[in-house]
Image: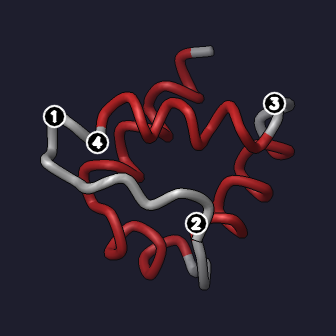
Amino acid sequence: MEKLILTGLYLSKYDLVSLKKLGFGSFVEAFNTVGYALGAKPMSVKNYRDEFDPVFRNPPKGLA
């Protein structure tokens, strides 16, 4: 579970830069790839990212 939390933190803090650095074209792609790689549902990665968004003042993005 710690890996999911850290992934959510990274995706939230670095936002679109994190996608570029990891080679993803969208958050959906990142959620799917990272979720399955960590043995979790993609929505779990999204939910952890969403939990950190208020800390970094990121507006909600949905699944886009």
Can you say whether 37 is above or below 26 in the image?
Answer: above
Residues at discs 4 and 1 in contact (Cβ within 8 Å): yes
Gap between marks 2 and 1 measured at Cα:
18 Å
In front: 40, or 58? 58
Residue, disc 1: 55
The mark nearer the N terminus, 3 or 4, is 3
Q: In the image, is 61 to the left or to the right of 40?
A: left
* SS category of the residue bearing label 2: helix
Q: Position of residue 36 (x, y in %)?
A: 86, 44
Check disc 2 and give the amino acid type.
Phe
In front: 63, or 22? 63
Choose top left, top right, bottom left or bottom right for residue 20: bottom left
Check disc 1 and give the amino acid type.
Val
The mark nearer the N terminus, 2 or 4, is 2
In front: 20, or 47? 47
Can you say whether 29 is above or below 35 in the image?
Answer: below
Q: Residue at x 62, y 61 (%)?
A: 63
Residue, disc 4: 53
Choose top left, top right, bottom left or bottom right for residue 54: top left
Check disc 4 and give the amino acid type.
Asp
Estimate how packed mark 2 is, as few (under 14), some (14 to 19) or many (20 or more) residues with alpha carbons within 10 Å.
many
Label disc, if present, on residue 9 of the rendered structure? none
